[in-house]
């Protein structure tokens, strides 16, 4: 389900009294993990006589409010909201200033502190903010919703040896006699609370000069804790200037803010597009080895966050129902960057990855409209529907309108709504005006309803008449629960209605390709074409112009031709998938033989995923061979991950051999986890040794810790109990230890299981938030229903968005209390293992006595 029962519709707040400027004057003490001072709101009266203002503010101390103009106010505070009432309202358009003095001590979220301690003597030293979606309220008294966008002034005081960063431009720094300094930053443009940011710390800096563009220079600089050097920063963010040059040209607008700084800190949760000050988790900082695995990903994230400077920062969604206007657009700009900077293959592959990520969520978890107001917490919206699902729909719109009209519409939208808030209809109306097209139906079926078309295609050649016939059927209408309500979040279904869209059909004969576009509107269509000869290849939607899931097997002969001769990566991916799905030694061997000659890394990776899904003896043989020969670091992690459900001595030996000869960080992480999954055949001592070795960003060690759990060996318990302790393992790897402890606990006898659960309960109070959350998930994996009271108490200490996650954990634990479910799960796993062994025996026997067609 998309959201738990009881979700309500969310709407933007009334703004009869609107904050238009915010002055933040705070003394930030990293060692004390506190911030204290005065925040002053400049307020404008939108309605004459209005007297009420409500501000979000969680767990503030020493609170005092004053109207700086001497107007009498009354206020009350319940620990969550400050409710202010003026005895007399103001005229429409009048401004007043409201000063709020307060203190926060080690807030739950929003403002994060880190400093060396006895348990973590090498910890980074910093205080920094991270807000998406509604976490500014933990330290900043504000209306913590995106439609409220004041300009900003910061006066931040901290130790004089620290770097102080904030949104906007640095106006001055003033040193004080007590060893502190105050930095004065200002942002003239409007900024919602979730994009408000500061960072203070002992930082390494990499200055990348100014990007000149069409206007004044935009300063580029990158920061990290002293645990990283300038080479990590330049290697990770060195492509920023080129990305900015491309993006300003693509969007036809100069960069809209005075600087573009990026900082990376530990345990900071992905990346966040704060205006002019983007934050990253420092796991993305690249050494030379990780650059080979994640260089593409880091550039991709860089594109995404910079795209938000226009889509989300300059033009802000009015509320989270329309969050796709920023997240789907930023994700689609990644696709466009690959297209323009790296070529057609990379573009098509990214489109493929986006569609597959969206399908996985829509098919296995829930299928919701892209635009919806119903959720418990706004962070629930940030899923695979919002990012790749929305991006794929934007590409479908681009293909429907054509490049010229699509990009003219996008540029017009940005120009006309710069500095404003928007809803989906604002974007639709711009695209309609520019293109002359009526797009109501398009937006209804792609954005306001859940689901997507599932196409089952067939091709028949009639030699006598010289006709080739394509049959196209929309099968999503057959989905369980289909109908007007399907796909609205009640379950996982691709939707129960018919889609209307143009579809390209193509065929290739003697190297010459012809295309025809047809219109799909009904459940079933047949399209016959007179051809000179039977085609060598036939394709449906060869350019990925429509978000659809395609089932199409034109026969092994045509697929084998397509595997080698398709000029695009999509064609070769699909051919390999269908040949692997056929399951025959002959068809699998065609893919295996082609592996070394396939030029595009992503095609090989997708073939590996399909081989892993097949799981047959022949598929495992092909995977084992691929592990031995693959050298592209971009492929290795995914190749090994594709084998995660495979237990096979030959494959495990190949993995161990590759580890011995050296694997990059992420691949080594997965390799140890894969070896642990071999159960009783796992090389326990080697996994245990790897679980005790520090590694870059904790990657390899984390994989080994999870590998220990995968062995189900009781000897792993003591190791995992130790590795969960602060000071015994880096904080980067400890979350994996907690997660692994829960995974192992589920398989232990009563007393060892109780020890594991007791430790996980203790970790709910750990000083590192990620360890706490990993412990909560560990209790879920352990089916520790006895820990429900402790999890409920833990829930009360968390942010609203984390509470939603914990609610899901609690719901699953309450289900697991049913002993019949546990027994059924055990029986099912035993049956799966027996079936796997029987399938292997059957395939070996079949291979001896049959010859593939």
Image (cartoon, helix red, strand yellow):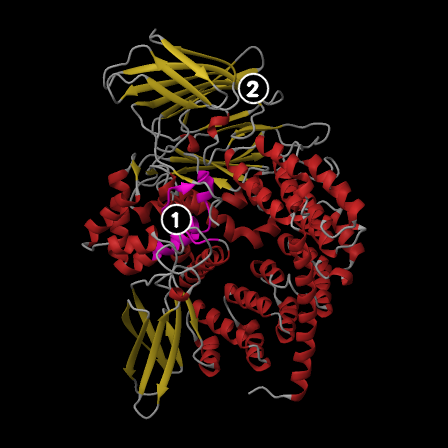
Q: Does the residue at mark 2 contact the one at mark 1 (Cβ under 8 Å)?
A: no
Q: Which residue carries the number 1 mark?
A: 328
Q: Which residue carries the number 2 mark?
A: 160
In the image, which is nearer the foreground, mark 2 or mark 1? 1
Span shown in magenta: 366-395
User: In the image, is residue 399 above or below residue 384?
Assistant: below
Q: CA distance from mark 2 to mark 1?
A: 41 Å
Whether residue 36 can be seen here = no
Q: Quadrant of residue 509?
A: bottom left
User: In the image, is residue 166 above or below residue 682?
Assistant: above
Q: Earlier in the sequence, mark 2 or mark 1?
A: 2
Q: Quadrant of residue 653?
A: bottom right
Number of callouts: 2
User: In the image, is residue 168 above or below residue 544?
Assistant: above
Q: Position of residue 257 (x, y in %)?
A: 36, 34
Quadrant for the C terminus, please.
bottom right
Residue at image point 38% right, 65% down: 477
User: In the image, is residue 136 above or below residue 417?
Assistant: above
For this view, does 66 lie left or right of residue 680? left
SS class of the residue under badge 2?
Answer: loop
Q: Nearer the viewer, residue 808 or 464?
A: 808
Q: Nearer the viewer, residue 653 or 493?
A: 493
Q: Position of residue 471 (x, y in %)?
A: 35, 77
Q: Position of residue 571 (x, y in %)?
A: 43, 71
Q: Position of residue 44 (x, y in %)?
A: 29, 20
């Amino acid at each position: 389900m998309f959201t738990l029962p009881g979700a309500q519709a969310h709407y933007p707040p009334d703004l009869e009294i609107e904050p238009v400027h915010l002055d933040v004057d705070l003394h930030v003490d990293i060692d004390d993990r506190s911030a204290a001072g005065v925040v002053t709101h400049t307020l404008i009266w939108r309605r004459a006589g209005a007297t009420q203002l409500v501000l979000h503010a969680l767990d503030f101390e020493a609170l005092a409010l004053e109207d700086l103009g001497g107007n009498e106010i009354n206020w009350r505070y319940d620990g969550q909201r400050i409710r202010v009432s003026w005895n007399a309202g103001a005229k429409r358009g009048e401004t007043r200033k409201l000063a709020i003095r307060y203190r926060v001590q080690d807030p739950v979220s929003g403002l994060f502190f880190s400093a060396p301690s006895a348990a973590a003597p090498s910890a980074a030293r910093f205080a920094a903010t991270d807000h998406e979606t509604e976490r500014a309220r933990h330290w900043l008294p504000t209306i913590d919703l995106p439609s409220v966008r004041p300009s900003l002034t910061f006066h931040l005081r901290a130790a004089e040896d620290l770097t102080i960063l904030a949104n906007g431009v640095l106006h001055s720094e003033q040193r004080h006699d007590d060893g502190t300094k105050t930095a004065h930053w200002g942002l003239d443009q409007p900024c919602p609370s979730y994009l408000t940011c500061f960072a203070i710390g002992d930082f390494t800096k990499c200055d990348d000069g100014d990007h000149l563009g069409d206007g004044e220079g935009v300063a580029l600089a990158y920061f990290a804790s002293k645990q990283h050097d300038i080479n990590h920063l330049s290697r990770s963010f060195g492509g920023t200037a080129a990305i900015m040059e491309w993006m300003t040209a693509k969007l036809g607008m100069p960069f809209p803010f005075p600087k573009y700084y990026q900082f990376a800190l530990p345990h900071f949760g992905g990346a966040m597009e704060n205006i002019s000050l983007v934050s990253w988790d420092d796991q993305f900082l690249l050494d030379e080895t990780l650059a080979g695995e994640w260089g593409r990903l880091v550039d991709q994230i860089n594109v995404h966050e910079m795209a938000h400077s226009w889509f989300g920062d300059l033009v802000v969604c009015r509320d989270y129902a329309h969050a796709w206007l920023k997240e789907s657009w930023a994700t689609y700009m990644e696709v466009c960057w690959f297209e323009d900077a790296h070529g057609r293959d990379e573009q098509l592959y990214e489109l493929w990855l986006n569609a597959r990520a969206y399908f996985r969520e829509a098919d296995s978890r829930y299928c919701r409209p892209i635009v919806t107001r119903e959720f418990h917490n706004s962070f629930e919206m940030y899923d695979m529907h919002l990012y790749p699902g929305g991006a794929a729909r934007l590409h479908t719109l681009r293909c429907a309108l054509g490049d010229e009209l699509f990009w003219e519409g996008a540029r017009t939208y940005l120009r006309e709504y710069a500095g404003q808030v928007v809803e989906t209809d604002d974007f639709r109306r711009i695209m309609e005006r520019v293109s002359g097209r009526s797009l109501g139906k398009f937006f209804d079926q792609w954005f306001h309803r859940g689901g997507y078309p599932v196409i089952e295609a067939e091709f028949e050649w009639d030699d006598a008449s010289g006709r080739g016939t394509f049959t196209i059927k929309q099968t999503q209408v057959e989905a369980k629960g289909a109908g007007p309500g399907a796909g609205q979040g009640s379950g996982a279904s691709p939707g129960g209605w018919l889609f209307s869209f143009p579809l390209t059909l193509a065929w290739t004969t003697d190297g010459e390709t012809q295309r025809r576009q047809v219109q799909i509107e009904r459940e079933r269509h047949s399209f016959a074409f007179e051809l000179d000869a039977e085609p060598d290849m036939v394709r449906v939607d060869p350019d990925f112009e429509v978000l659809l899931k395609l089932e199409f097997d034109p026969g092994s002969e045509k697929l084998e031709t397509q595997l080698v001769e398709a000029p695009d990566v999509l064609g070769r991916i699909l051919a390999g998938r269908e040949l692997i799905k056929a399951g025959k030694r002959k068809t699998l061997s065609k893919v295996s033989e082609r592996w070394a000659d396939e030029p595009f890394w992503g095609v090989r990776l997708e073939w590996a995923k399909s081989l892993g899904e097949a799981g047959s003896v022949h598929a495992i043989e092909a995977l084992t061979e691929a592990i031995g020969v693959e050298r592209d670091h971009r492929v290795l992690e995914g190749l090994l991950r594709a084998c995660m459900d495979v237990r096979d001595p030959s494959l495990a030996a190949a993995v161990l051999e590759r580890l011995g000869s050296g694997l990059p960080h992420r691949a080594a992480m997965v390799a140890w986890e894969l070896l642990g999954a071999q159960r009783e055949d796992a090389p326990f001592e080697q996994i245990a040794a790897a679980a005790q070795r520090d590694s870059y960003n904790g990657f390899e060690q984390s994989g080994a810790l999870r590998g220990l759990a995968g062995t189900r060996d009781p000897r792993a318990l003591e190791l995992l109990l130790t590795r969960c302790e602060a000071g015994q393992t880096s904080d980067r790897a400890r979350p994996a230890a907690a997660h692994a402890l829960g995974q192992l606990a589920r398989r232990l006898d009563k007393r060892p299981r109780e020890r594991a659960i007791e430790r996980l309960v203790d970790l709910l109070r750990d000083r590192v938030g990620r360890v706490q959350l990993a412990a909560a998930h560990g209790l879920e994996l352990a089916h520790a229903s006895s820990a429900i009271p402790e999890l409920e108490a833990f829930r009360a200490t968390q942010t609203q968005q984390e509470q939603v996650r914990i609610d899901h954990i609690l719901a699953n634990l309450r289900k697991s209390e049913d002993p019949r479910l546990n027994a059924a799960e055990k029986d099912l796993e035993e049956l799966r293992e027996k079936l796997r062994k029987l399938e292997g025996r059957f395939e070996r026997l079949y291979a001896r006595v049959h010859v593939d067609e």
